[in-house]
Image (cartoon, rainbow, N blue to C red):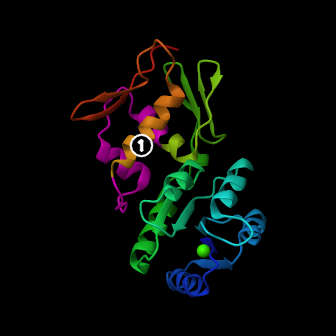
Amino acid sequence: MRILVVEDEAVIASSVRRALIDQGYAVDVEHDGADGLTQARMVAYDLIVLDVMLPSMSGTDVCQALRADDDWTPVLFLTARAGSSDEAHGLELGADDYLTKPFSTVVLLARVAALLRRPRASAEQPFSVGDLRLDPRRHRCLRGDVEIELTAREMEVLAFLVRRAPDTVSKLDLVDNVWGESFDGDPNIAEVYIGHLRRKLDRPDEPAAIRTVRGVGYRLDVGDA
Ligand code: CA
């Protein structure tokens, strides 16, 4: 497993590198956003640990540039402030997870392991339910004939609901499966993503595509093809 670490703070970069190497990962380090992007484009990494605040190019811009290239290498963001809009913004832009500084090495390694264990969206076959068609490999979502733009995480949340349809999925199940069992952030993140998906999927004058089953969870209900 080969991991790219992009972090401008030398002390953090070297401690993250050391911790990952001790676990047997091959590690490359860059200290600048633009250099990180160049490196990420040259080597097929299994994971990128990406600081948000970087010289020359922010981590969110690096991630967005990779996703625009159709590169879905898992990205773990390192953010400076807890509860800041950076996090939500980073996740919107296609990061797979984030860690707020300061973080412990144990937590970092758990998150890295969880991301590496997770099946890559690109390995999945297309599937459909009702008039919704999902092709994670090509990162495409269609509702009827309308193409819907989804972030990496939105795609994972929707894919999980589609695979379980017509069953109801609990919030806990959703968080465990999409964010990983080691996720220790706010489980209400699931609601945030369901909200994003509803805004993208729902059509005026039609019932919501994702129903809330009170006290149980969520169920996909998109009608017939
Ligand atoms: Ca930084």
Q: Tell me the quadrant of ligand 1.
A: bottom right
Would you identify the image quadrant in which residue 83 lies? bottom left
> Residue 45's spot in the image, x, y percent?
66, 66
Relative side of 80 to 176, left or right:
right
Relative side of 74 to 66, left or right:
left
- In the rendered view, would you say 2 is above or below 128? below
- In the rendered view, would you say 87 is above or below 109? above
Magenta-colored stretch includes residue 164: yes
Would you identify the image quadrant in which residue 163 lies? top left
Q: Which residue is mark 1?
A: 192
Q: Residue at x 56, y 87 (%)?
A: 11
Magenta-colored stretch includes residue 214: no
Q: Residue at x 54, y 64 (%)?
A: 77
Q: Residue at x 46, y 41 (%)?
A: 157
> Residue 205's spot in the image, x, y percent?
46, 12
- In the rendered view, would you say 80 is above or below 220? below
Quarter occupied by the N terminus: bottom right
Q: Which residues are magenta?
A: 157-186
> Residue 159's spot in the image, x, y percent?
49, 38
> Residue 166's spot in the image, x, y percent?
36, 26
Q: Amino acid at mark 1?
A: Val
Is the residue marked by circle 1 packed among few (<14), some (14-19), or many (20+) residues within 10 Å?
few
Q: Residue furthest left?
A: 215
- In the rendered view, would you say 152 is above or below 13? above
